[in-house]
């Protein structure tokens, strides 16, 4: 599967502060205050800003800072505090991070807002995923989803969309993606009834990814065609939708539509989402080859993509010159890459295009050539295969030639006056 769009943040430059810098806890408190203001004023843009600030802070999250933040925000003895604290490693008292940014001692601010509680779930879940504690992350995400089902507030929708994404990611990383398909469908139904459009488009993409992960393209198309349509709220979710739609159209042999979807997804994707744009380009290259087009060299020379697109560059070269033996060699050499990209089945379809290109080159170069020589040049298994391929190419209009079955020759009309060759 393709890599999802995750905004990569540059690490902050080091300073003279010790390793247990109070800045992380201080920033978390500021973000919580921003979420609280957004919840009371019902301003979703403040929640969005809080999420952006959290993503920038993600690499600095430590267990000590999270424990201090949970104790600061959640009510003592509450179910959320007890559950979330159990997912974090135990820290000594002296290791607990203290916010020294304020000169005077600050009394803990206990919140009962659902937005703050869901935000705490999101923080702990991201931390567990970054620490590669996937089993704990699965338990945390499942608990957060169970809590979300009982909350119907528009200011929670933005946080919920993030939780849905990480919920699916946890199960995908452990190979258990099929287990949550029913739950995702239930969540999508709930989001639809609540008119949560951001949640709908997020869950629709997660369901499409779930189906495509197991090659269930028919089910994915049925769901996509019946899902409610509305204007996209998130550029990242819209890019993912275009990518999945492009893959579905490719399997349905609708190559023109697939090409447009994939190229549009690559153009609209954030610059930081390099892996996503690479996957879009890989599929778009294969589709263009299937359409009989040869991608420009500049496609393979895009910044940061040269190494990843190298197998597809060599494959394109084999298709361009119509060398079936070279095509087989490239397919075998990079078989593991094509399999991991899930493009192997599409590359099998390209064999016919390679043969047609080679046959086209032969028809231009030779006015008359025996089918035995055609089979040798195209590296075909038998003369009978060459005869059937030439006959089909002539019927489809791919080459302008005549097939002489009596003398088992192909007479090309593209090399000048060919009529006298019938009587030679």
Image (cartoon, rainbow, N blue to C red):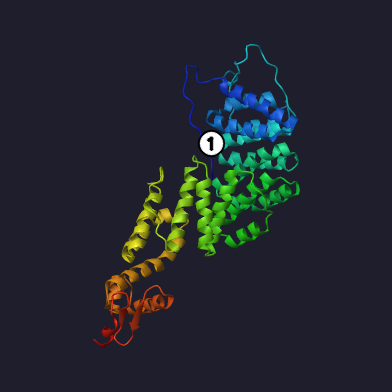
From this view, report whether residue 382 is shown above or below residue 87: below
Q: Position of residue 286 (x, y in %)?
A: 44, 58
Which x, y percent locates residue 258? 52, 58
Q: Is residue 153 left or right of residue 338?
A: right
Task: Describe residue 163's horizontal placement relative to residue 390 as left or right.
Answer: right
Element at badge 1? helix
Q: Is residue 139 visible?
A: no
User: What percent of the width, then of the height, locates residue 361?
Assistant: 31, 69
Q: Is residue 349 above or below residue 49?
A: below
Instruction: Name above or below for residue 218 compared with residue 161.
Output: below
**Extreme residue in the front direction:** 417
Q: Which residue is mark 1?
A: 130
Above or below residue 294? Residue 402 is below
- Count of marks overlaid on the render: 1
Residue 272: image x %, image y %? 49, 39
- Residue at image position (53%, 36%) is 130
Residue toward you, 138 or 287: 287
Q: For residue 81, what is the image quadrant?
A: top right
| Residue 5 visible in image | yes
Q: Place residue 43 in its image quadrant.
A: top right
């Amino acid at each position: 599967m393709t890599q999802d769009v995750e905004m990569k943040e540059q690490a902050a430059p080091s300073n003279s502060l010790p390793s247990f810098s109070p800045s992380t806890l201080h920033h978390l408190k500021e973000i919580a205050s921003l979420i609280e203001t957004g919840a009371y004023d019902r301003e979703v843009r403040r929640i969005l800003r809080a999420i952006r600030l959290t993503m920038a802070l993600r690499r600095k999250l430590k267990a000590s800072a999270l424990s201090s933040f949970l104790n600061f925000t959640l009510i003592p003895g509450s179910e959320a505090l007890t559950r979330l604290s159990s997912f974090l490693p135990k820290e000594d008292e002296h290791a607990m991070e203290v916010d020294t940014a304020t000169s005077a001692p600050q009394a803990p601010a206990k919140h009962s807002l659902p937005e703050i509680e869901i935000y705490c779930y999101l923080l702990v879940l991201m931390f567990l995923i970054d620490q590669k504690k996937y089993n704990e992350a699965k338990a945390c995400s499942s608990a957060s989803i169970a809590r979300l089902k009982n909350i119907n507030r528009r200011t929670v929708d933005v946080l919920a969309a993030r939780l849905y994404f990480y919920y699916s990611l946890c199960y995908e990383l452990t190979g258990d993606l099929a287990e949550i398909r029913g739950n995702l469908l239930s969540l999508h139904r709930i989001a639809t009834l609540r008119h949560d459009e951001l949640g709908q488009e997020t869950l629709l993409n997660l369901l499409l990814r779930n189906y495509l992960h197991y090659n269930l393209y028919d089910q994915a198309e049925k769901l996509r065609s019946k899902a409610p349509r509305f204007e996209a709220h998130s550029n990242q979710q819209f890019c993912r939708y275009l990518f999945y739609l492009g893959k579905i159209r490719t399997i349905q042999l609708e190559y023109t539509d697939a090409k447009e979807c994939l190229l549009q997804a690559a153009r609209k994707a954030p610059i930081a989402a390099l892996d996503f744009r690479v996957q879009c380009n890989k599929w778009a290259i294969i589709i263009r080859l299937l359409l009989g087009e040869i991608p420009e060299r500049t496609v393979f020379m895009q910044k940061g993509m040269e190494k990843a697109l190298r197998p597809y560059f060599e494959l394109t070269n084999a298709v361009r010159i119509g060398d079936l033996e070279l095509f087989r060699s490239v397919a075998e050499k990079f078989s593991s890459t094509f399999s991991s990209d899930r493009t192997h089945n599409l590359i099998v379809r390209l064999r016919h295009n390679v043969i047609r290109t080679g046959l086209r080159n032969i028809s231009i170069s030779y006015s008359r050539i025996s089918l035995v020589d055609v089979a040798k040049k195209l590296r075909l298994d038998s003369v009978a295969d060459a005869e059937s391929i030439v006959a089909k190419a002539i019927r489809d209009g791919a080459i302008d030639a005549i097939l002489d079955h009596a003398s088992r020759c192909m007479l090309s009309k593209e090399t000048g006056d060919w009529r006298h060759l019938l009587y030679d």
